[in-house]
Amino acid sequence: MLDLDLLSRPDAKDSFNPKESFNPKESNATKQHEEFILTEIDRALVMATQEGLPVSERPYQVIGEEVGITEDEVICRLEKMLEHGIIRRIAVIPNHYRIGFKANGMTVWNVKDEDIKRLGRQIGELPYVSHCYQRPRHEPYWSYNLFAMVHGTERAQVEERAEKLKAILGNSCLGNQILYSSKILKKTGMRLTKKTDPENPGDK
Amino acid sequence: MSRVMNELDKKLINLLQDGFPLTARPFLTVSQQLAEMGVEASEAEIMQRIQALLDEGTLSRFGPMYQAERMGGGLTLAAMKVEEEDYERVNEQVNAFSEVAHNYRREHELNMWFVLATETPEGIAECIEEMEAKTGYHVFNMPKEEEFYVGLRFAL
């Protein structure tokens, strides 16, 4: 399962740096917060592409044929959706287990409410944090309100990095844990399902 | 099934995690992008590699990543505390919901963590209610209150 070749490379330990090649096109990095209303064509495009693009010389033409619009229109609508952040990006998503990042630690922190906005931003800026959110607590079962996803080639690396987060949070941190994933149970990406039949544009 | 990635595969994954071109011949554009980096690979070769990486599961997706909330939909992270003897059954029941985008087993009392994406913001509550009725387990809803950073990249 695991790419041992990758793991055994001397530089593999430090090879994960999600922000090194940060794409300025990434939607949440920019401004688009205004509501974007999807047209029926957009919805049909979402339906046709949400499971992925065809690996074909002209994938946008294939999609266009399916939806009933030209290749140019497909490209233009997708560009628009990218601009408005409807699409985060068009890209490949590796299965991180298969490419050697077997340690996937969801680090969770109980941070004092008055400090979380300031500290959350600081944690989000760390190069090895890929996702960082504030979420609600569910006392008494769940007391953590800050989530920071840390990936590494091994657990020791994740733990080393979690220690750095802990140092930044300092006295504002009232408790923390690392939740490792031991299995991917499902990974399909989101799906539009209801009320989206392109044959039935009135069904909305 | 498992196979050691070659140098071209690694270059492709690094490059295409950041973005896939919106051009009429995108794989040709990728071939030109690689050429600029000093890597020679034809359009046909790149297509063949991407298909192979998808088939063998090294890539889990290839295409647009949609943001449910920006489409006026709902999105949340949810967790369940499932007894070991029920785990398989509950997993099947949860995965059967098309609203479940991904689902991870995690080592904690809360041992099932999944993302729900629905077409409307109200859809989240409906889906959770239905899920609780079906599985007999409580669903802990943990919607994001603030996003500090999202940008997942693996440098190979």
Image (spheres, coloured by chain):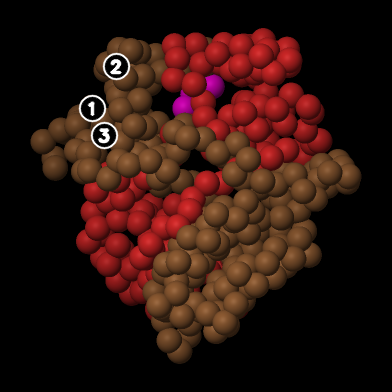
Answer with mark 3 or mark 2, whichever residue precedes in sequence: 3
Q: Which residue is mark 3?
A: A43
Element under disc 3: helix
Of tags 3 and 2, the one toward the viewer is 2
Q: Residue at (62%, 51%) from the top-left corner?
A: A127
Q: Amino acid at mark 3?
A: Arg
State the CA–CA distance, disc 3 to disc 2: 14 Å
Is residue A24 shown above or below A18?
above
Where residue A129 appears, as percent x and y from the top left, is: 59, 56
Question: Going by the image, does B9 lie left or right of A108?
Answer: right
Quadrant where the image shows the C terminus of chain B: top right
State the CA–CA distance, disc 1 to disc 2: 10 Å
Q: Which residue is mark 1?
A: A41
Q: Which residue is mark 2?
A: A73
**Image quadrant in which you'd find residue B54:** top right
Q: Residue at (46%, 80%) from the top-left corner?
A: A112
State the CA–CA distance, disc 1 to disc 3: 5 Å
Q: In the picture, one chain is red; tell me its letter.
A: B
Where residue A53 appears, as percent x and y from the top left, is: 47, 27
**The numbered mark 2 sits on a residue in which chain?**
A
Query: Does the image show residue A108?
Result: yes
Q: Residue at (22%, 39%) from the top-left corner?
A: A36
Region in magenta: A51-55
Query: Does the image show residue A178?
Result: no
